[in-house]
Amino acid sequence: MKRIKIGLFPYTSSLESPADRRRLVFWAKRRGHELLLNETKGVDLIFLSEGCDFLRYSKVSTAPKIFDLIDGYLGLQGGYSDITRGVAKSILRKHQTYPRAYSSIVQETCRNVDLVICSSPEQKVTVLPFNPHVEVILDNHAEIPDLPFRFSDNDRGSVALWEGTPHTLKGLENLVAECDSLPDHINIVTDLTYFKYMNRYLKFDTASRLRQSFGSQKFNLTSWSVANLVNARELSNLSLIPVNANDGIQALKPENRLLIMFKLGIPTLTSNIASYSRIERLLNFKFTCESWEDWGTKISDLMRNPEIGEHQINLGKRYLAQFHNEDLLFDAWDRAIQRVL
């Protein structure tokens, strides 16, 4: 492919958001393409992230357009949070359209663009009614070191790792509230502060939230960085990825966090949402949890029998080598971009 100019409408101007640096940005920089931020003229391609007024720019006719839809907004379909989000974003002019459900804004955008990229086969099903041209591409995890399995035997007892954004903490809070057999400590790697609404309004302190919701459950909070994530992994016996499945967006989350844990070499338990259940079937290894009691049983099993976790990691790393390596990701981006040029 010849060198092209891409009009990129990113999440952040620094391109440091994971949704920027782990997706188109890593591919474009490696392939030597030119990124022109927030530009629609004089480019070969317009690439729209969820962080911009994607509906507005989906109507531009100067170049082919790709919409990188990494969240499952089309799984909401008119619920309360869907309507609230859409009305708020239109009133605040985040999207220059009349007040309506957010999924409606996303649907219209999908119809307008030449290609939609999403994060999982499950999410693709929700996009196809609005655009037949859809590619599934997961994040690039090159920044995460590939570490071997190691059972951390320390004097703190059982220690679990949780990582993610504060907006996904609800799943962990539900687990702490409902499960009777939790690890003694939980290492949490996330942002220390966050905005509750639209990444701009009502700033909250993560530690204060956790102290209120965790009660007597012990935890250690550190800000998200690769170094802090690796350090927390070294101090932990297992990883937990509970998901608030009552939230339509969370229920459609792809398997990125699970694959990161495989790469870090730490045994992992998850909720049984569609993406994790799909990987579970492919590995032929049970790690999703179907009830709070199931969570407690599987946590105890992993703590008593480290060989179970080692087997999971061996299967997980084999999966990464076969289905989620950098060559495959670059090929996927190459195919996606060439479809619209």
Image (cartoon, rainbow, N blue to C red):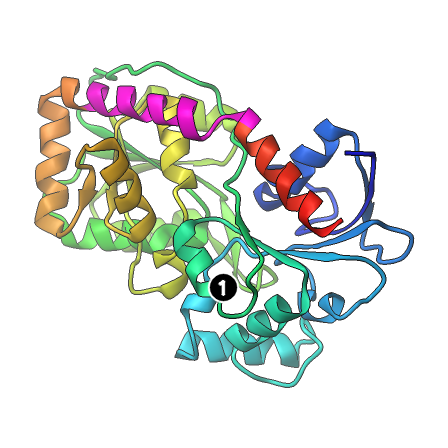
Classify 279 as above or below 82: above
Which residues are the magenta region?
309-327
Whether residue 22 is visible, yes or no, is yes
**Given the image, on which type of amino acid does mark 1 rest?**
Leu
Classify 6 as above or below 28: below
Give the image quarter of residue 232: top left
Count of marks, rendered view: 1
Residue 271 rendering spot, x and y as whole percentages: 25, 48
Q: Residues within 10 Å of mark 1 (few under 14, many from 20)?
A: some
Classify 174 as above or below 198: above
Residue under the image location 41 percent in, 31 percent down: 260
Residue 121 rendering spot, x and y as whole percentages: 41, 51
Classify 279 as above or below 81: above
Whether residue 232 is visible, yes or no, is no
- What secondary structure prevails in the magenta region? helix
User: For this rendering, which residue is in front, 22 or 170?
Assistant: 22
User: For this rendering, which residue is in front, 14 or 232?
Assistant: 14
- Figure quadrant of the N terminus: top right
Q: Is residue 189 left or right of residue 110?
A: left
Q: Is residue 133 left or right of residue 191?
A: right
Residue 332 rendering spot, x and y as whole percentages: 58, 38
Per the image, the residue denoted by label 1 is: 128
Q: Is 317 in the magenta?
A: yes
Residue under the image location 68 percent in, 60 percent down: 114
Q: Is 235 in the magenta?
A: no
Residue 327 rendering spot, x and y as whole percentages: 56, 25
| SS at mark 1 in the image | loop
Residue under the image location 50 percent in, 41 percent down: 138
Q: Is residue 294 left or right of residue 326?
A: left
Residue under the image location 42 percent in, 30 percent down: 323
Give the image quarter of residue 261: top left
